[in-house]
Amino acid sequence: MNGPEVLRIVDAIHRDKKIDEEIVFEGIEQAILSAARKHYGEDCALVVSIERKSGQVTATIDGAPIPEEELSILGRIAAQTAKQVMIQKIREAERDTLFDEYSERRTHLITGMVTRVDQAVTTVQFDKVEALLPRSEQIPGESHKVGDRVRAIVLEVRKQGTRIKVVLSRKHPDLVRRLFEVEIPEVAERIIEVRSLSREAGYRSKVAVTCYDNSIDPVGACVGVRGTRIKTIIDELDGERIDIVRWNDSLPVLIPNALQPAEVEDVIMCPMLGKVIVLVREDQLSLAIGKMGQNVRLASKLVGWDIDVMTREELDQQLDRSVQAFSQIPQVTEDLAEALVSQGFFSFDDLSVIEPDHLQELSSLSAEECDAIVARAEEESEREEQEAKVRKAAEKAERDASGKPGDKKPASNRRTIPAKEAETKPKEEAPSDNEKTEG
């Protein structure tokens, strides 16, 4: 194994496998070293090195150079060992190269072909790897067959032995973002920007867009003529409904946009609680909340604030109830109770999380008195929670005793929706091709 031959092998592996030359040199050194240990024994102090520019191999045993003749014999003995070592090194190097390559492609869109379908996972071939699309990352209700073309984003990349494991997702919100970049040229060219996005995969998405060119309508450009552009994305997402709204840096403007198609009368900011009270007419209430709270939940995620939807009459009633409840705390005057509800504190649960210094700002109370109010609010909140549990248990027992399991009261829509609430909800009907919401 002379110098030019070593260099030729290293160069061939480097070009064909795209593996760093240093890794190949180290693999050959390790192969010769393994052969030398078999020849001279494990107890000898062996050192093998290859000169990187000339490819010349040098080796020592217990500090003394190994003659060229013996080194040539070792080179022949090392051939078989080198084969196994190099295969291992090449596999590890290929794995590391692929890992680095696909790690950079996280959240990026890929297109592959389905090669195998199991109950728990679908295998997708793309580029040099077989990626996995777990059932948990597929759009609810969709199914795949061998040979189908699949678009998904790279969700996770990790090393697994001498291979890498690439996990794909079709449920992640970034899939919608990437499809907008592919299907809408203005988004790809950064003329239109997707500022925020919320999604419940397979059911509905809300996308807030803005444009840096005042002559372009960002919503209209995304929808396309007669909905042609957005229809392509909807078809790719198995009929998922997509609401496109206009982004605005002002929350009082953005929130009504996000709640479309409902009409909003007023927006009341409650910064201490990080929530917003949205007032709508009675005939708009169910539309603003949406089926199973979906519309307000997605709007909340889109803007990053909790949203409480109610009518003006409901708000007035809530204010009266809250003022009356808070006034029962000895340290809370009626003026303080009104100040608290004006900041959006409607329940003892809300009041239990108020910062004492914020409470001092709203009143002339001492720190000790503020701490006492918060402690009392925590007690009342726990009491109400326990009463609610007892009441639900009694209702369940009554239903069970009646022997009518189907005679259950329908669950009311939840109106206060946390911005980071989980995304598992029942599916709505797929909209018609032109069913889009413009901001």
Image (cartoon, rainbow, N blue to C red):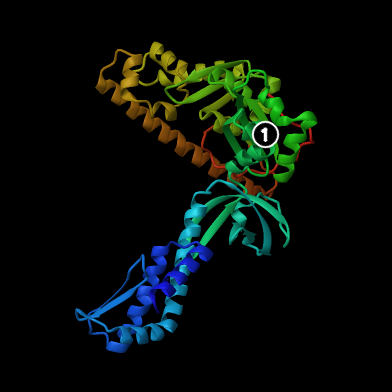
Compared with residue 387, is residue 124 higher up or lower down, i.e. above or below? Answer: below
Q: Residues within 10 Å of mark 1 (few under 14, many from 20)?
A: some
Left or right side of 11 for 355: left
Compared with residue 50, is residue 97 higher up or lower down, i.e. above or below? Answer: above
Residue 431: x and y in percent read 76, 37
Residue 223: x and y in percent read 72, 30
Q: Nearer the viewer, residue 73 or 300?
A: 73
Q: The residue tagged with tag 1: helix, strand or loop?
A: helix
Q: Residue at x 29, y 16 (%)?
A: 365
Q: How many marks?
A: 1
Q: Quadrant of residue 282?
A: top right
| Residue type at the position of mark 1 | Pro
Left or right side of 422 for 142: right
Q: Nearer the viewer, residue 228 or 293?
A: 228
Q: Residue at x 59, y 22 (%)?
A: 212
Residue 145: x and y in percent read 73, 60
- Image quarter where the C terminus lies is top right
Q: Is residue 161 visible?
A: no
Residue 75: x and y in percent read 38, 82
Q: Residue furthest top?
A: 335
Q: Is residue 113 visible?
A: yes
- Image quarter where the N terminus lies is bottom left
Q: Quadrant of residue 348?
A: top left
Compared with residue 321, is residue 25 higher up or lower down, i.e. above or below? Answer: below
Q: Residue at x 62, y 56 (%)?
A: 135
Q: Nearer the viewer, residue 195 or 346?
A: 195
Q: Residue furthest left?
A: 63
Residue occupied by mark 1 = 185
Compared with residue 430, is residue 296 higher up or lower down, i.e. above or below? Answer: above
